[in-house]
Amino acid sequence: MNFKSLIYATRPKTLPASIIPVLIGSFASLDSPKFSISITFLVLFCAVLIQIFTNFVNEIFDFLKGADNEKRQGPKRSISTGDITVMQMTVASAIVGVVAFTAGLKLVMYSDWVILALGIISLLFAFLYTGGPFPLAYNALGDLFVFIFFGPAAVLGTYYIFSGIPGAGIVLASLAPGFLSANILAVNNIRDIPTDSEVNKRTFAIILGRSNAIRLYNFTSLLSYLSVIASGFISLNYWLCLPLISIPLAVKLSKELKNKYGKDLNSVLEKTGLLLMMFGLLLCLGFLFGK
């Protein structure tokens, strides 16, 4: 097995999508008696492994379904280039999934059965994203999956471990990383409209069309800012409005998304990931300064 290609297949540039919501949930819980740095790192470990599991499974099924071919406009995938076989990626996926589940059992012991249920559901839907008889990504449900699991599920799951039942403020804040993570997928799908159409991959971008998909990207960006503003006012912690500093980058990306096509959208995808990081870290600072 080509381990360099396996590392590349983890899609390191996308991993902030799982890291940021865990950090948000952790920073929101800093004043909890149960807060633990070591447990925070364990949550991060499990969250990243679940995302890597998703990426591995995604690569397997996109290759088998013909979505990863020579016409692909995004970064090349390790299976399609022949660097890793389907069987090797299947084994790697199984190992990552088992390690994630096993490590997660420590979180269950620290918390309760709710975290066990969340972990099992997360792994199940990570597989169903592109696998199974009704793959979410091929039936216009990928955006919803990303929003839920890289937003509310990750943020509130982390918060629950340390602080128990979440209040309205953290619930509203948890929406923001979900919206921005969904936008990362949206750019990917807008770029791939021509090639996805050829293999009957019905993404939300294909159903809406390019123009409406871009409008949705802009709308969800707006919602991410509105959610933290609302969270700040409900929590009486106006530091939670710190992510507004990132608005110029969001506006710049909106313009680039409208004017770029094909491979040129790869830079917009990466910068949308950067926006998620910037937004998320500012939100973490908002929770820290508001304590």
Image: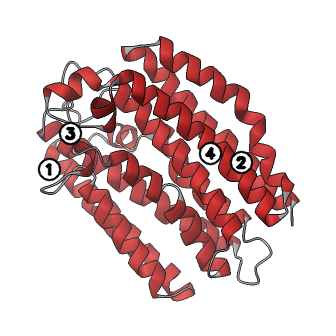
Alpha carbon distance from label 2 to label 3: 32 Å
Distance from Cα at disc 2 to Cα at disc 4: 14 Å
Q: Amino acid at mark 2?
A: Leu
**Quarter-of-image position of residue 149:** bottom left
Q: Amino acid at mark 4?
A: Ser
Q: Which residue type carries mark 3?
A: Asp
N-terminal of the pair, mark 2 or mark 4, is 4
Instruction: Give the mark nearest the N terminus, 3 or 4.
Output: 3
Question: Would you name the residue on which mark 1 appears?
Answer: 87
Give the residue pinned by disc 3. 62
Q: Secondary structure at mark 2?
A: helix
Front in this rendered view, residue 269 or 51: 269
**First along the sequence among labels 1 and 2:** 1
Point out which mark residue 281 bears. Answer: 2
Q: Nearer the viewer, mark 3 or mark 1?
A: 3
**Answer yes or no: do the residues labelled 2 and 4 have beta carbons within 8 Å?**
no
- Residue 224's disc is 4
x%, y% of residue 230?
Answer: 72, 55
Secondary element type, mark 4? helix
The kind of residue on which mark 1 rests is: Met
